[in-house]
């Protein structure tokens, strides 16, 4: 068992090379054979770059409204209580709706890998439905 008490992870600004807009994260980095757990707060219009995860990703929306999309798929709206899963190496992005903040918990499995993220190109304003 590993216990990480509330407040033991530092809230940090999401790196500008990973996100568009203002994003704040409370990371619990992955440790094999576990998962990384990240609480991520997006301000209105903020979003991730396109990215993939070697073992997929699970999102649980806590509050606000958000958007998510896989490459070639439709943009879907996210609301509190929604769960979204991405398959291993599925190219996707997610973030807040244009007029709402969003808080989600992201879980990156790390059974066979380090559970990391391959960050790709930004989601441009022409791609983002705002």
Image: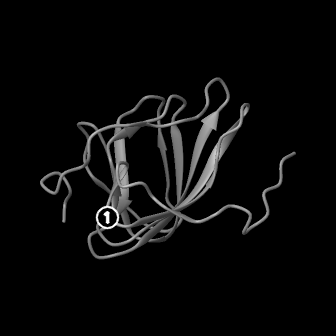
Query: Quadrant location of residue 129?
Result: bottom left
As rendered, which of 67 and 116 lies closer to the eye?
A: 116
Instruction: State the image coordinates of residue 3 (x, y, percent, origin top left).
Output: 83, 54
Disc tally is: 1
**Residue 59 sits above or below residue 46 on the image:** above
The residue positioned farthest toward the top in the image shown: 112
Crowding at mark 1 (Cα within 10 Å: few <14, some 14-19, many 20+) = some
Point 58% across, 54% down: residue: 38
Residue occupied by mark 1: 21
Point 37% across, 59% down: residue: 95
Q: Going by the image, does 51 lie left or right of 86?
A: left
The residue positioned farthest toward the bottom in the image shown: 99
Point 25% across, 47% down: residue: 74
**Residue 58 sits above or below residue 89 on the image:** below
Instruction: State the image coordinates of residue 112 (x, y, percent, origin top left).
Output: 65, 23
For the N terminus, which image quadrant?
Answer: top right
As rendered, which of 15 and 105 lies closer to the eye?
A: 15
Judging from the image, what secondary structure is the residue with disc 1 in? loop
Residue 34 in view of the camera: yes
Point 23% across, 37% down: residue: 72
């Amino acid at each position: 068992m590993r216990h990480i008490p509330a407040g033991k992870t530092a809230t940090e600004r999401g790196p500008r090379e990973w996100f568009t807009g203002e994003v704040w994260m409370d990371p619990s980095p992955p440790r094999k054979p576990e998962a990384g757990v990240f609480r991520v707060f997006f301000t209105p219009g903020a979003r991730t770059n396109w990215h993939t995860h070697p073992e997929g990703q699970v999102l649980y929306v806590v509050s606000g409204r958000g958007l998510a999309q896989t490459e070639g798929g439709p943009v879907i709206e996210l609301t509190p209580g929604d769960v979204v899963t991405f398959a291993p190496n599925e190219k996707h992005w997610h973030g807040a709706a244009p007029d709402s903040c969003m808080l989600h918990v992201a879980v990156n499995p790390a059974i066979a890998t380090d559970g990391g993220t391959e960050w790709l190109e930004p989601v441009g304003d022409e791609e983002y439905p705002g």
